[in-house]
Amino acid sequence: MASTIRLHVAHPLGAGQTVPLDAGQAHYLFGVMRKGVGEIVEVFDGVSGTWLAEVVEARKKVGVLACREQIAPQRDPPDLWLLFAPIKKVRTDFIVEKAAELGAKRIVPVLTDFTNSERVRADRLQAHAVEAAEQCGGNYVPEVTEAAKLDRVLADWDPARRILFCDESAVGEASDFRRLSPGSEAGPWAILIGPEGGFSEAERARLLGLDHAHPVSLGPRILRADTAAVAALTLWQAALGDWV
Ligand code: SAH
């Protein structure tokens, strides 16, 4: 059975609401997927849950849907941010896609001392997060922020949000994840993953000096940054998140 097409729309959803599609969505739905008037798709706007909607207008670059019924309530991920240093384009795309699937609330590219100085296009990364949400059945889309210097991010940090500092120099040490317990560590968190070159000594010293930063090991092997992001998100979700 072909699965229902899912679309994220930048338009509020609700009973009786009509929803205009953008040119790209109209092309995809009618040109590529050959859908037409009367057919049903799933839509979500990121805040109103998942809705079934009927195609009521289908032209080449113009389309209109009409909301019919809500089939799932809004489900937001836990308050977990992923901070990561951008790496090569495809691997950065991978990190954003996996963070959206694994349930990060916000994705923050951070520029560290050893970050490869590739330009980060937040709008392109945001589009990856939308696609990931569409295909994974969720109805929340994490916000991808503009890249910011790690220094600045830490200077402006709210200490109530704890930082899980994935520190490659702790490789091989017992992972602290087993000590994270849902009761005592509830509240907002962020995972921090460094670039291919790792963190500088200055960055490590600064992070280790912060009360709200908790260094952790991700096991006995050095992981690539993209693997480390997936591993840390998984461990956090299993210990404290919505997989529990
Ligand atoms: N070039 C560095 C490794 C960087 S790995 C070195 O050889 O030491 C990229 C990022 O993944 C690291 O900055 C860290 O955040 C994370 N990471 C990889 N393996 C890890 C491990 N075993 N424990 C904790 N963090 C790890």
Image (cartoon, helix red, strand yellow):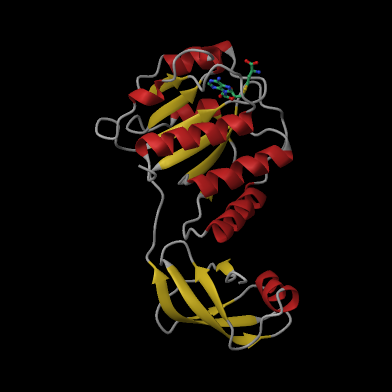
The picture quadrant where one finds residue 79 is: top left
From where the camera sits, is residue 87 visible?
Answer: yes
Count of marks, rendered view: 0
Residue 85 in view here: no
Q: Quadrant of ligand 1?
A: top right
Q: Quadrant of residue 201?
A: top right
Residue 58 position, x and y percent, is: 66, 85
Q: Left or right: where does residue 71 sit relative to residue 182?
A: right
Image quarter hosting the C terminus: top left
Residue 233 vertical placement versus 32 (above, below): above
**Up-down: is 124 above or below 205?**
below
Position of 58 with respect to 213 (left or right) is: right
Which residue is at a point 48% across and 58% down the rendered structure image? 138
Q: Nearer the viewer, residue 226 or 189?
A: 226
Identify the residue shown where x is 41% and y is 72%: 71
Residue drawn at x 47%, y 57% is: 140
Residue 219 location, x and y as percent? 52, 20
- Residue 33 relative to residue 198: left or right: right
Placement of the N terminus among the 4 image quadrants: bottom right
Q: Could you say where residue 226 lies in the image, as x and y percent from the top left?
A: 62, 33
Position of residue 136 measured from the top left corner of the image (x, y, whole percent): 54, 56
Outermost front residue: 1
- Up the image or down, 167 lies above or below 161; here it is above
In the image, farthest residue toward the left? 183
